[in-house]
Amino acid sequence: MASVTLENVGKTYPNGQVAARDMDLAIQDGELVVLVGPSGCGKSTTLRMVAGLETPTAGRILIGGKDVTATPPQDRDIAMVFQTYALYPHKTVRDNLAFGLRMRRLAADEIGRRVREAARTLGLEELLDRKPAQLSGGQRQRVALGRAIVREPKAFLLDEPLSNLDAKLRLQTRAELARIHKQLGATMLYVTHDQEEAMTLGDRVAVLEDGRLQQVASPAEVYRRPANVFVAGFIGSPAMNLFRGLLQTDDEGPRFESSGCTLTSGVGTIPGRSGPAILGVRPPDIELCDRESADLSARVEVIELLGSAILVHLRATAAEEQTIRAVGPEDWEVAEDEVIGVRFNRERLHFFDGDGGRRLN
């Protein structure tokens, strides 16, 4: 395996559309990095540039320390797994796995060895003589992954490989991918729009917006300390609650004021700061309480059962445009249309600049 490095990589199409901007990303040997972001943010374009299917208009790409920016795809020694399985329907699983190796004119015994090892790793040994039409969606995806594994490439590129699977199969195959990565010690660059996949699979997560990297960090760091408002709102399900307001510091100390909400405790993490700001609070960090001890009052609009927990959608009574989501135990005693108090966990408040959106605390 080998490292993959992007240095100031950019991509602008002839019509002026910018798909990637000044992208710096270093994927270490054996690391699994997930590119995640909304549709159109440039994550698949970035993957295709690493694969050689798109040509950067700025910067350079290195694989194993070698500049491959102008190297044809077939000479980069990488393997790509696409969103569609792209299996040959008339060939057996064995022949699908072996096809690329035969095209490279490897010896028959070497082809057999690689196919057997990939089949054993992926649990396909009993399926080698079946054709794709006889396989489930999860099995087909494992064959597509096996076709990449037999190549023994320097790096794997995976472009939303689980998006065509149903929810149950997606969970199963995601666990398989995590196991395979650990077993192979493979360098992987994985693209998805599903933040749950990103958080559970990646050694590190790279969050993109409009072709620009917003944050590259471990899943825990991205969740607990989002670098800006975009990352805060995109990572986490349900999404973080965001309250626009004003930070002020006077003789009484720092405080945050928003419609119907004034906070003093918990604001001391950003002393001396004044001006427009955004307060972020994740739904699990909100508790329901009596209105006398609350940070604000809100009306319950919708209650969703999440199994062992409930998700409560509220609307602030003092600012009707402000919606709030709170997650709590299923025995929370709330009813629709009830007006209740809401209190924030002071140890888990996030503050962002009201203009640029960057993290303040």
Image: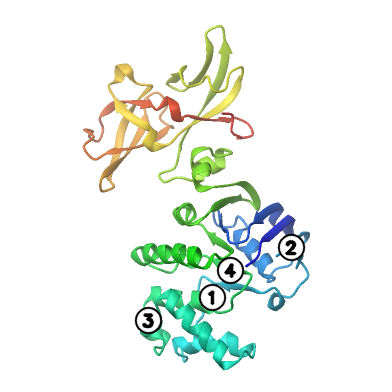
Which of the two discs, 2 and 1, labels the residue nearer the N terminus?
2
**First-in-chain label (3 vs 4):** 3
Given the image, on which type of amino acid does mark 4 rest?
A: Phe
**Marks 3/4: CA–CA distance:** 24 Å
Calculate the distance from the C-alpha at mark 4 to the C-alpha at mark 1.
Answer: 8 Å
Assess whether mark 2 and mark 4 are in contact (beta carbons under 8 angstroms): no
- Relative height, residue 358 to residue 254 (above, below): below
Secondary structure beneath label 3: loop
Q: Is residue 36 above or below residue 304?
A: below
Q: Which residue is mark 1?
A: 149
Residue 72: x, y in percent?
74, 75
Using residue 118 as the reference point, say whether residue 74 is left or right of it: right
Q: Is the residue under label 4 in contact with that under label 3 (CB below 8 Å)?
A: no
Upstream in the sequence, badge 4 or badge 2?
Answer: 2
Tell me the residue that label 4 is attached to: 156
Q: Is residue 97 visible?
A: no
- Report the front residue among 233 and 158: 158
Which numbered disc, 2 or 3, marks the residue that appears first in the sequence?
2
Secondary element at tag 2: loop
